[in-house]
């Protein structure tokens, strides 16, 4: 299996892979694409987190993906947008602005995510 965020992995095959293989697949994609990243490993981890959520059927992530695609983002951009929201919530936990990862707050943020808001706030 060769990972391609524009198509997305088959959920059953993705879930069958171990975390190390998932990470290796994402790293290999970005290497093949010759994308220059400040931290390729962290970038790949964020891809894996989002792909895991989608493969496991996390509805808030799936709805966000569908909405972002309908708003003109390609799938790779949509994965980045979802990862951006996830990273904000992890940042709050790390900086102790939140005592634990708040799954409800994360789901709510995904529900409010749009292509326009992502481009404005993350760009």
Image (spheres, rainbow, N blue to C red):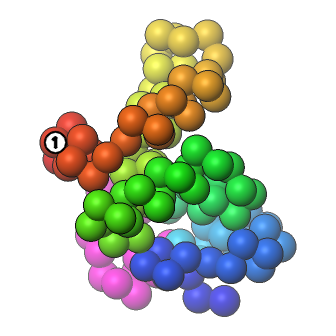
- Count of marks placed on residues: 1
Foreground: 75 or 98?
Answer: 75
- Is residue 29 covered in magenta? yes
**Which of the 4 image quarters holds residue 40?**
bottom left
Horizontal side of residue 118 vs 98, given as left or right: left
Note whether residue 7 is visible.
Answer: yes
Residue lying at 30% horizontally and 66% vertically, measured from the top left? 73
Packing grade of label 1 (10 A; few <14, some 14-19, many >=20) is few
Whether residue 33 is in magenta: the answer is yes
Q: Position of residue 21 (x, y in %)?
A: 70, 73
* Residue 20 found in image quarter: bottom right
23 horizontally vs 63: left or right: right
Please name the residue shown 47% across and 20% down the image: 92
Residue 17 sits above or below residue 78 on the image:
below
- Under circle 1, the secondary element is helix
Q: Which residue lies under the disc numbered 1?
A: 120
The span picked out in magenta is 27-43
| Relative to 102, residue 38 above or below | below
Given residues 108 and 10, the one toward you in this image is 108
Q: Is residue 122 left or right of residue 79?
A: left
Evaluate whether residue 37 shows in this view.
Answer: no
Q: Residue drawn 34% across and 84% down?
A: 33
Q: Position of residue 103 (x, y in %)?
A: 64, 28
Q: Residue at x 62, y 78 (%)?
A: 9
């Amino acid at each position: 299996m060769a990972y391609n965020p524009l198509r997305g992995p088959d959920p059953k095959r993705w879930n069958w892979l171990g975390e190390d293989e998932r990470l290796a697949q994402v790293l290999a994609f970005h290497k093949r694409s010759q994308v220059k990243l400040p931290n390729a490993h962290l970038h790949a981890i964020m891809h894996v987190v989002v792909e895991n959520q989608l493969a496991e059927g996390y509805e808030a992530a799936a709805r966000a993906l569908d909405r972002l695609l309908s708003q003109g983002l390609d799938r790779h951009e949509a994965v980045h947008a979802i990862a951006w929201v996830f990273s904000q919530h992890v940042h709050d936990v790390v900086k102790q602005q939140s005592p634990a990862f708040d799954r409800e707050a994360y789901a709510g943020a995904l529900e409010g995510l749009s292509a326009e808001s992502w481009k404005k706030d993350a760009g």
